[in-house]
Image (spheres, rainbow, N blue to C red):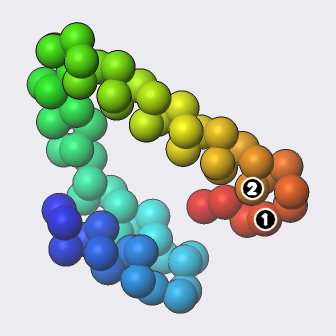
Amino acid sequence: MIGNWLLFTSTTFIIGVGRFTVIMFPLFILFSLIASRRSWHRIITVWSLLFLALFTGLYVEGHWVF
């Protein structure tokens, strides 16, 4: 999973990123198991909201957010 994440972040041709990130699906299951603890739930929530704000800002500015 880490290898796939490194692969899709290091590529300059981002059209095919979707097929590289499909393998990262188990990460959501891992997050759900970790989030059973209240402190980790807050950390994951803040982390997700920060990325949501980043990608929303990029989209509003007209950048292609894949």
Q: Mark 1, residues whose alpha carbon is within 10 Å: few (<14), some, or many (≥20)? A: few
Q: What SS does tag 2 mark?
A: helix
Image height check: is 12 above or below 14? below
Of 27 and 16, the residue lying toward us: 27
Q: Please determine whether, in this image, residue 43 is positioned above or below residue 57.
A: above
- Based on the displayed image, in which of its 4 quarters is residue 22 positioned? bottom left
Residue at x 23% of width, y 24% of height:
40
Q: Are marks 2 and 1 in contact (CB under 8 Å)?
A: yes
- Side of 14 relative to 62 (left or right): left
- Quarter of the C terminus within the rendering: bottom right
Q: How far apart are the alpha carbons under marks 2 and 1?
A: 5 Å
Is residue 32 at least partly visible in the picture? no
Q: Is residue 34 above or below residue 24?
A: above
**Residue 3's x, y, as percent?**
19, 74
Instruction: Name the image quarter holding residue 1.
Output: bottom left
On the image, the x and y values in percent for residue 36 come to 16, 14
The residue positioned 45% from the left and 64% from the top of the image is 18
Q: How many marks?
A: 2
Q: Quadrant of residue 42?
A: top left
- Residue 63 - label: 1
Which residue is rendered at x = 22% and y = 32% of the image? 31
Residue 26 at x, y = what percent? 18, 44
What type is the residue that disc 2 sits on? Answer: Leu
Tell me what residue is drawn at x 78 percent, y 65 percent: 63
Q: Residue 32: x percent and y percent? A: 21, 25
Residue 49 visible at all = yes
Secondary structure state at the residue bearing disc 1? loop
Q: Amino acid at mark 1?
A: His
> Is 44 positioned to the left or the right of 66 in the image?
left
Residue wearing tag 2: 58
